[in-house]
Image (cartoon, rainbow, N blue to C red):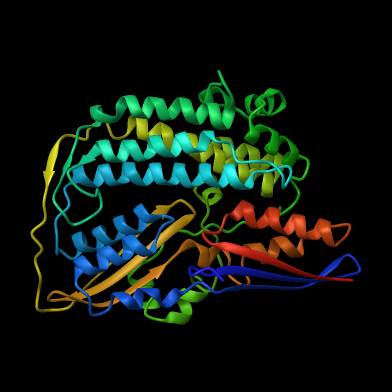
Amino acid sequence: MPVEGEITIKVKARFSQIEFVEIASSRPLHIAQLFIGKSINTVENIINMLYQLCNIAHRFAFLKLLNENKTIQLSQNEMSAYHLLLALETIKEHCFSIASKWNISKYTSIDVGIISLLTTIKEISNTLFTGGDPLSLANKQLQPFESVEKLIFKLEKQLQSLLLGEQVDSNLVFSHLKHFDSWLQTAESKAAIFLNNLQSLNKIGDVKALHLPDLNLKELGVLLQNDAYIKQPNYQNTLYETTPYSRQSTHSFIEEMTEVNGRGVFTRASAQLFEVFELLHRVKNDYQHIVFENISYTPQFFEIETTALTQLEAARGRLVHQMSIRNKTIISYQILAPTEWNFHPNGVLKQMIFSLNFTDKEDLIAKVKLLVNAIDPCVGYSVEVDYA
């Protein structure tokens, strides 16, 4: 079993009906206990080492906690740069999921273009921040937005080529559902072929979606003190999902798609693709105010215990960190990841599986995997089916 754990989905079916669904996680949710009694520098290094997926999201959350409890000070300029890197990380993780999971056949190879794209995203980060690791507590220099404009233009061309096809205008594709459908029918990109095939399966997973609302942070802070809550979260006795589809569900394009195609795997996959280009638009337009800045921190520590909570949107959904610190020592730390919402034992995936129609065991397994990939866990998963 991988160190980061995995999701296990067990399904029992009899006479073409689902009788039983069990969703279990072996993710090491107690891992934040490693931070207790440690210094901020040690914890910063541990977080960087532990979290390979959503690395920027976790490290940014830690810096935000230190800022909110006044241990360090982050300028608005610096915060903007971290939000830019977070958007790029979400683009990167979406693209890797698309490249590795959007396959018509299990024999389909990963497009080598993804390697060039990931290299460009890394180059943007290394150009925007110089002299040190962008999210470390070490001294570094933040360069102006102009320093990465050409690289962002290069990234835009790579994304359009990899995901949409050569000479395809993303603004037109996502401007209206009829243009999106036209692209599906004519484009030859791997994403278009996959989605075109998936559209005929749009009823798979078409169940009511409850998206995680804004949370009362004071109330959430108390709930996070309970390990059982972190393992199986709910809010005001209701189970929610927090996914790319959740984030984009109120956009007019995705609203129209949901109305026409429902809330199943096709709409969810399309929302993930749509979000890539929505984030690209923000990267191009929302951070032009970033200017040069020498960044260094002089940590301030207090004899009284202070607690801070922060949340941000990571690639797979809303990520929450909470920390208490006294003097130079971290007293407690909790992390609530989106996977715990999205793969709750009684959450949206369970509803989706119970809604399935299938012809045989292989068909059931294939459809369950489509559902899991549409939600996109941050860890590996296995599907076990007892069929008769």
In the image, taking residue 335 as reference, residue 108 lies left or right, namely right
In terms of depth relative to the viewer, which is nearer, 109 or 231? Answer: 109
For residue 306, what is the image quadrant? Answer: bottom left
Residue at image coords 63%, 35%: 191
Give the percent coordinates (x, y) of residue 242.
51, 57
In terms of depth relative to the viewer, which is nearer, 376 or 110? Answer: 110
Give the mark count. Answer: 0
Q: Residue furthest top?
A: 167
Residue at image coords 11%, 56%: 297
Give the percent coordinates (x, y) of residue 169.
53, 21
Residue at image coords 41%, 63%: 215
Give the percent coordinates (x, y) of residue 183.
65, 25
In the image, taking residue 13 as reference, residue 260 lies left or right, namely left
Give the percent coordinates (x, y) of residue 284.
36, 30
Image quarter hosting the C terminus:
bottom right
Compared with residue 133, is residue 334 higher up or lower down, i.e. above or below?
below
Image quarter hosting the N terminus:
bottom right
Compared with residue 49, is residue 167 higher up or lower down, i.e. above or below?
above
Q: Is residue 278 visible?
A: no
For residue 25, what is the image quadrant? Answer: bottom right
Q: Is residue 236 visible?
A: yes
